[in-house]
Image: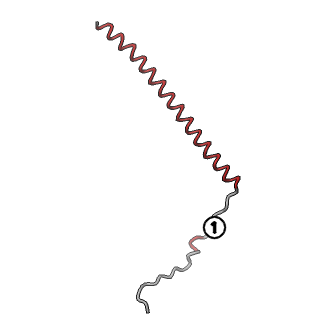
Amino acid sequence: MQSGIRIIKRETQSGMKGVSGKQIAKSDRDREREAVDTVKAWVADWEERKRSLQSAAVSLIRSIESGRETSTKRFAESS
Protein backbone atom coordinates (compact mmCIF):
# COMPACT_ATOMS: atom_id res chain seq x y z
CA MET A 1 0.00 0.00 0.00
CA GLN A 2 1.31 3.46 -0.91
CA SER A 3 1.40 6.13 1.72
CA GLY A 4 0.38 9.55 0.49
CA ILE A 5 -2.53 11.79 -0.17
CA ARG A 6 -4.81 11.10 -3.02
CA ILE A 7 -6.97 13.94 -4.30
CA ILE A 8 -10.09 13.16 -6.21
CA LYS A 9 -11.76 16.11 -7.90
CA ARG A 10 -15.45 15.78 -8.37
CA GLU A 11 -17.75 17.73 -10.66
CA THR A 12 -14.94 19.59 -12.42
CA GLN A 13 -17.12 20.04 -15.50
CA SER A 14 -19.94 21.71 -13.54
CA GLY A 15 -17.72 24.70 -12.73
CA MET A 16 -17.29 25.37 -16.42
CA LYS A 17 -20.91 25.53 -17.46
CA GLY A 18 -21.41 27.34 -20.71
CA VAL A 19 -17.71 27.26 -21.58
CA SER A 20 -16.67 24.87 -24.27
CA GLY A 21 -13.28 23.22 -24.00
CA LYS A 22 -12.83 23.66 -27.73
CA GLN A 23 -12.25 27.05 -29.28
CA ILE A 24 -14.58 28.17 -32.01
CA ALA A 25 -12.77 27.94 -35.30
CA LYS A 26 -12.67 31.25 -37.15
CA SER A 27 -13.07 31.40 -40.86
CA ASP A 28 -10.38 32.81 -43.10
CA ARG A 29 -12.60 35.81 -43.72
CA ASP A 30 -12.89 36.52 -39.97
CA ARG A 31 -9.11 36.30 -39.53
CA GLU A 32 -8.56 38.61 -42.50
CA ARG A 33 -11.10 41.09 -41.12
CA GLU A 34 -9.31 41.11 -37.74
CA ALA A 35 -5.95 41.64 -39.46
CA VAL A 36 -7.35 44.52 -41.53
CA ASP A 37 -8.89 46.13 -38.44
CA THR A 38 -5.59 45.82 -36.57
CA VAL A 39 -3.60 47.41 -39.39
CA LYS A 40 -6.18 50.21 -39.76
CA ALA A 41 -5.87 50.94 -36.04
CA TRP A 42 -2.05 51.03 -36.34
CA VAL A 43 -2.26 53.45 -39.28
CA ALA A 44 -4.76 55.68 -37.45
CA ASP A 45 -2.46 55.78 -34.39
CA TRP A 46 0.54 56.57 -36.57
CA GLU A 47 -1.31 59.39 -38.37
CA GLU A 48 -2.47 60.89 -35.06
CA ARG A 49 1.09 60.76 -33.69
CA LYS A 50 2.39 62.37 -36.89
CA ARG A 51 -0.15 65.22 -36.64
CA SER A 52 0.71 65.72 -32.99
CA LEU A 53 4.46 65.84 -33.69
CA GLN A 54 3.96 68.25 -36.60
CA SER A 55 1.87 70.54 -34.42
CA ALA A 56 4.48 70.43 -31.65
CA ALA A 57 7.26 71.18 -34.16
CA VAL A 58 5.39 74.18 -35.58
CA SER A 59 4.75 75.50 -32.06
CA LEU A 60 8.42 75.06 -31.16
CA ILE A 61 9.63 76.83 -34.30
CA ARG A 62 7.20 79.72 -33.72
CA SER A 63 8.30 80.09 -30.11
CA ILE A 64 11.96 80.09 -31.16
CA GLU A 65 11.31 82.66 -33.88
CA SER A 66 9.33 84.95 -31.59
CA GLY A 67 11.93 84.58 -28.85
CA ARG A 68 14.73 85.36 -31.30
CA GLU A 69 13.16 88.69 -32.25
CA THR A 70 12.82 89.88 -28.66
CA SER A 71 16.28 88.67 -27.70
CA THR A 72 17.76 90.41 -30.73
CA LYS A 73 16.00 93.64 -29.82
CA ARG A 74 17.20 93.30 -26.25
CA PHE A 75 20.82 92.90 -27.38
CA ALA A 76 20.52 95.79 -29.86
CA GLU A 77 19.11 98.10 -27.17
CA SER A 78 21.76 97.22 -24.59
CA SER A 79 24.68 98.03 -26.93
The residue lying at 43 percent from left, 90 percent from top is 2
Whether 8 is drawn above or below 40: the answer is below
The residue under the point 71% across, 52% down is: 29
Q: Is residue 54 above or below residue 30?
A: above
Q: Is residue 47 left or right of residue 56?
A: right
User: Which of the image's four quarters has the C terminus?
Assistant: top left
Q: Is residue 36 above or below residue 51?
A: below
Q: Position of residue 60 (x, y in %)?
A: 44, 24
Residue situated furthest bottom in the rendering: 1
Give how far across and how far down residue 39 sits, in percent: 61, 44
From the top left corner, tell me how far across and down residue 65 is, in percent. Answer: 43, 17
| 14 to the left or right of 2 | right
Instruction: Give the residue type at disc 1.
Output: Lys
The number of numbered badges drawn on the structure is: 1
Applied colour scheme: secondary structure
Instruction: State the residue at coordinates (33%, 7%).
Output: 76
Helix or strand or loop: what does disc 1 sit on?
loop
Q: Residue at x 35, y 14 (%)?
A: 71
User: On the picture, is 40 further left or further right than 57?
Assistant: right
Question: Which residue in the structure is indicated by mark 1?
Answer: 22
Q: Position of residue 57 (x, y in %)?
A: 47, 26
**Label 1 crowd (10 A; few <14 / some 14-19 / many >=20):** few
Q: Quadrant of the N terminus?
A: bottom left
Query: Toward the viewer: 10 or 43?
Result: 43
Q: Is residue 19 left or right of residue 53?
A: right
Image: 35 above or below 9: above
